[in-house]
Image (cartoon, grey):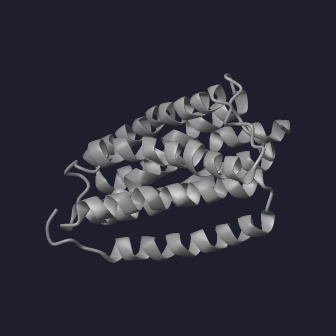
Amino acid sequence: MRPIAYITLAFAPLIAASVYLYLGQKYGQSFRKVMVQSFLCGMLSVLILASAKLLSTMLGLNTLTSLKRILFYSFITVGFASEFGKFILYRYYIIPKKTIDKPIHGISMSVMVSLGFCSIALLSFMLDPFHTQALYPYTLYAFIFVPANLIFSVIMGFFVSMGKFIKTYFMFALTGLLGATFFQGLFIFTLITQDFKLLSLFAFGSTVIVFILGIKAALTEPEAA
């Protein structure tokens, strides 16, 4: 990995600090407290991904010798494990808080969870203490890791937070988890296969989707929490 890639370790903490200062000043102390909790939850959620990678290595599943292995590694070992770790703490610890009284607030906390996750996951990726990494174009991955995970956080945050205010909570929460898992898995798949045309389409399409979801969440004013 090129030494310049190590500057990407500062991306997530700097973005988190900026979001904290802006939204904290706008919404007050209780909102700031939940943002900090969300960031810490994201850091803790890396344990699920680390466990999945370690287990995958022990079972020999990180040897990506076939399309099936690549798909399993992309969508299960990394995709599902990454998003499930975030989802559990976000859905059952952060979302129930009274501070989350609008879908857009839920997305904000999902972003903070993701930034906490990125802060530790990217460092772990670079150090690779247990030799669990599959072959990626490392420098490219380092630079687009945080932006990609912000996209996944909006997708999960939209559906899970919207679900708080409607009767079909379970289905919305499940959609958030599966949607984020799919996009995370597709992201990893394009990197492993080095299909940069698909990666470009993924980046464009997911950005459009996130833009639409963000606007919808911002315009949604639930009658009751």
Is residue 210 positioned above or below 182 on the image?
below
User: Which residue lies most toward the left here?
Assistant: 224
Q: Does residue 49 sit above or below 139 in this rendering?
A: above
Left or right: 139 in relation to 146 = right
Q: Position of residue 210 (x, y in %)?
A: 51, 69
**Residue 197: percent from the left, percent from the top?**
78, 69
Q: Position of residue 89 (x, y in %)?
A: 35, 41
Task: Give x and y (percent) for residue 218.
Answer: 36, 72
In the displayed structure, 216 sits above or below 98; it is below
Q: Quadrant of residue 54?
A: top right
Residue at image x 31%, y 40%? 33
Residue 154 in view here: no
Q: Is residue 72 left or right of residue 211?
A: right
Res 123 seen here: yes
Front residue of 57/16: it is 57
Q: Along the line of sight, which residue is nearer the eye, 210 or 99?
A: 210
State the residue at coordinates (42%, 55%): 177
Judge by depth and name the residue closer to the eye, 58 or 34.
Answer: 58
Q: Quadrant of the N terminus?
A: top right
Q: Residue furthest right?
A: 2
Q: Quadrant of the C terminus?
A: bottom left
